[in-house]
Amino acid sequence: MLWYKGWLETRPMALFMLLFALFPIVLFLAVSRPANSAPQVSGGTAETAMTFNALYYSFIPLALAGSGIKTQSARMKRGVHGSTYFTLSLPVSRFRLFATRAGLGILETIALLAIAPCALRIAAIGPEDHVSRSDLFGFWVTLTVCASAIYFLGVLLSTILEDPVRGWASMFGLVCVYGLLSKVPLLAPLNFFRAIVSPLFTHSLPWTSMGISLAVAAVLGFLALRVVQTREY
């Protein structure tokens, strides 16, 4: 029942993020160009475009993140979502509520992020003969694993901030982090957006970055769970 309840609550946002994920593909297909004339771009330009693609799709886990208790509802009552009281009255632990909602969001994120490599292939960014299907699959795996840290950051913020504030704050913060990592040379080694697209150039998975992302996701998830278990709603 919790999974079905979570799906009913999240499907409007999931549908909106599906349209969000498909938008670059639709936009590219709407731009007419001669057949068999893929854009000729240099390696640096292709890497920049792919990195921006990773940033664009990183908004999906932020949008789908939720605490499992402060669920979405069109009606508000005294600063608390209308469905919060019903959720808290269910005969299940807060851990189960949290695990179900976070697990559902992860599954939706994984499914929607599969559109990202499709967008790169359709846009034909970079030398097509150097980017194989296995490279695109590696890109999807890396994006999904690294996005887990972004997802659980959104989960943690959702336990602290109200939805409108949390959404704008997380998106603004992600854009600022992307700008700093891209423009400040000293922060270049920490640019995990470049690590996400590295399988398209190195033809191998960035295991170190993926491991760090999973560790960060575990820490953020634990902190979010502690907030959910101790907070008075």
Image (cartoon, helix red, strand yellow):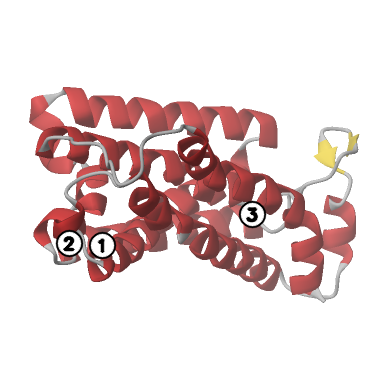
Q: Which residue is mark 1?
A: 210
**Could you tell which of marks 3 and 2 lies nearer the N-terminus?**
3
Q: Residue at x 72, y 72 (%)?
A: 93
Residue 223, horizontal then vertical, whole percent? 48, 55
Please name the amino acid that badge 2 sits on.
Answer: Pro
Residue 229, horizontal then vertical, whole percent? 64, 60
SS assignment at label 3? loop
Q: Which mark is residue 137?
A: none
Q: Nearer the viewer, mark 3 or mark 2?
A: 2
Q: Residue at x 55, y 47 (%)?
A: 22
Determine whether label 3 and label 1 are within 8 Å by CB.
no
As displayed, is residue 40 above or below residue 179? below
Q: Which residue is mark 3?
A: 67
In three-dimensional space, the C-alpha distance between marks 1 and 2, rounded to whole angstroms, equals 6 Å
Q: Which residue is mark 2?
A: 206
Label 2, residues with CA under 10 Å away: few <14, some 14-19, many ≥20: some
Please name the amino acid that badge 3 sits on.
Answer: Ser
**Could you tell which of marks 3 and 1 lies nearer the N-terminus?**
3
On the rendered image, what quadrant is the N terminus found in? bottom right
As displayed, is residue 103 above or below residue 56? below
Q: Is residue 65 left or right of residue 131?
A: right
Please name the amino acid that badge 1 sits on.
Answer: Met
Quadrant in which residue 58 is drawn:
top left
